[in-house]
Image (cartoon, helix red, strand yellow):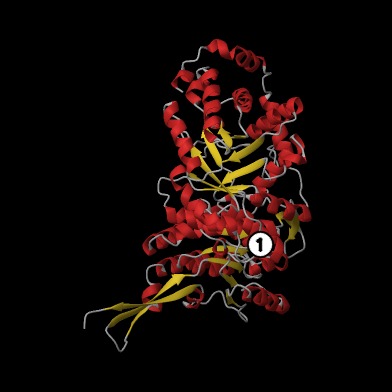
Amino acid sequence: MIGNDRVEVRKTHKLFIGGAFPRSESGRTYEVVNTRGEFLANIAKASKKDARDAVISARTGFNSWSKATAYNRGQVLYRIAEVMEGRKDQFINDIQDAEGISNKKAAAQTDQAIDRVVWYAGWADKYSQVLGNTNPVAGPFVNFSIPEPTGVVAAVAPQDSSLLGLISVIAPILVSGNSVIVIASTNSPIPAITLSECLATSDVVAGNINILTGDPAEIMPSLASHLDVNALDLTGVTDPELQASLEVEAAGSVKRVRKAPINPNWQATPSLSRIRAFTEIKTVWHPVGV
Amino acid sequence: MSSLDNRPAESHKGLLAFLAGLPGVDQVGAEARAAALGTRSIKKESKIWAIDLAISMVDLTTLEGADTPGKVKAMSAKALHPDPTDPGTPSVAAVCVYGDLVYAAREVVGDRIHVAAVATAFPSGRASLSVKLADTKDAVAAGADEIDMVIDRGAFLSGNYGKVFDEIVAVKQACGPAHLKVILETGELKTLDNVRKASWLAIKAGADFIKTSTGKVTPAATLPVTLVMLEAVRDYYQETNIRIGVKAAGGIKTSKDAIKYLVLINETVGDAWLTPDLFRFGASTLLNDLLLQRQKMITGHYSGPDYVTID
C-alpha cells in the first residue's frame, strides 16, 4: 500500500459455523504471530458455546450431506479443489507466514493439499466397494456389508501442517457423508480461515464443515462429552494427558476415537484408514429362495 | 343463537366506544422494550428453575391432519413424564389436540393434567356460529376442560367487533365449566393496535386466557405481541382485580426463547403470572429443547436429540 492513498482494508478473521462467518460468541480473540514472532492477526477464540452451535449446524448438515449420492459427494469435494485452485496465491502467502517456510515449499504444500482433496473426491463413489463386501455364509442368505457414515465428527487439525494436514483430516471425514467440526491449528490458523472462504463458495452443505479457531484444550472437552457428537479425531492433540481425558469423556457416549498419529507424514499418499475410521459397517442378511 | 349474529350494533355502543378510545401502541417502543428484556442475563440457578417452570407451562400440542389416536396417546404419556430418565421432571400443563381426539388424550392423562381442545372451526374460524358452538360442546362433552377458540378475524378486520364479541360470549357459554382461551391470531391482525383491541375485546367478552396464535400462520407468537397482550391483562387486573391468563403459541422453539417470555411476564405483569394457571406456551418442539437444556444443566454435558423422543 506504500505510495497509495487508499485506506487499508483490514480483515477480521472469524469462525465458520453453519455456512456463516460469526465472531466468537464470547467476543474473545487471540494474537497470532509468525515464526519470527511478528504480529500477524487477531484470531477469533472460540468458546464452548461456539462449539455447541457448531454441533447443531453439523447435525443439520449431516442430515442432508449423508443422503447425497456418492457421486454427488465426489463432485462437491472436487469443487472445493477447484475453488482452492483459484485462491492458490492467498494460500501460499498464508502458509509462508504461518509456517515460516519458503515460497517454493508453501506452493508445494498448497498443490499437495489441493491434490489431496481431488484424491479423496475420487474415493467418494469407490471406497464402499473396497471397505464393503458380500460375505459367504452357510445359509440361504445374501449377506453383504457396507460402510455408512458415523455422523458428526469433532476433529483437531494438526498443529504443524497448517493446510495439508487440515485437508488430510477433514477430507476423509467428509467423503463418506459425515459432517465435521474442526479446530484449526492454534498457532497457524490463517490458512484454515482462507479454506473456510473457499468452502463457503463450493456447494458444501451449510453446516457440514465448521471451522473453529482457538484452544483445543478449552473447546474439545465439551465436544468429547457432547451426546450429539459421534466421533472424535484427535490428530492434532499434542498433549497426551488431554488426549487421555478426551478419550475418557468420549467413552461416556461410546464415541469412536481416532488417536493422534505418531510422526505423521502428510506428504505421503494416504491409505483408506482415515475413511474407514469414521464409517460404521452395516451387515445385511437378505433371505433368498433355496 | 343465530339472532346473535344479527344483533344490532347499538347494543355494543359501549364496547365500540371503549375500543375506539384505546390508546395506540407505540410499535417501535414495544419492539425495543421486548428486545431489551430479551437480552437479560439469567444465571445458572435461575435458569434451571426457569426451565422447570417453562416445562410446567407447556401445552404440548399436536394439531395435524395426520393425527391419530395412537399419536395423541403417545404424546399424552410424554406430557405426564416428559423425561423418563429423570422422574423429577415436572409434567406439562396440558395436552392440546383437535376435539375428536380429546377422548384419546383423556384416556391416558386421567385428571392429572388438563386436556385442551381447539374448537370453533380451528384454525380459520370460517364457519357459522351454530357449527362453532356444536364443535365446542362436542369437545367439552368428550372431556376437554380447556377450549382454545379462534376469533373471526374477517369480522374483526372489517370492523365488526360486535360480532366477534358475541361469538366469544356464546362460545364461553357453550364451554360451561371448561376454561376458554381465545386465539387472536395476531399474525393476521397485522398491527399492534389491533392486537390491543382484540385483547380487550376478548377479555371483556369473558376469555379466561388470551392466546397469540394458532401456530398455522406466520408470524406466530412474538415478544412484542405478547408484551401488548400482557399489558392489556395488566391494565384489566388493575381495573378489576381479575387475573386473565396469556398463552404464547407457535414459533417458540428454544429454551432461550421461552426464558425471554418468562422475563417479559415478570417485568410486565409480575411474578403472580409465573404459573401454569396464568401463562402457557403452546408448543410441540419446545419441550424437547427444554428437556435437552435440563439434561445439560443436571449432567454438565451437552445432550442430543437422540436422547429425547421425536414427537
The answer to which of A275 and B132 lies nearer the viewer is: B132
Q: Amino acid at mark 1?
A: Gln
Q: Position of residue B213 (x, y in %)?
A: 55, 36
Question: Is there any visible trace of residue B42 in the rendered image?
Answer: yes
Q: Position of residue A166 (x, y in %)?
A: 58, 66
The residue pinned by badge 1 equals: B295
The answer to which of A108 and A30 lies nearer the viewer is: A30
Tell me which residue sits at (40%, 49%) in the image. Answer: B66
The answer to which of A219 and B309 lies nearer the viewer is: B309
Q: Is residue B40 above or below residue B84?
A: above
Q: Position of residue A101 (x, y in %)?
A: 65, 67
* Label tally: 1
Which residue sits furthest top? B10
Give the image quarter of residue A133. bottom left
Question: Is there any visible trace of residue A17 in the rendered image?
Answer: no
- B263 lies left or right of B63: right
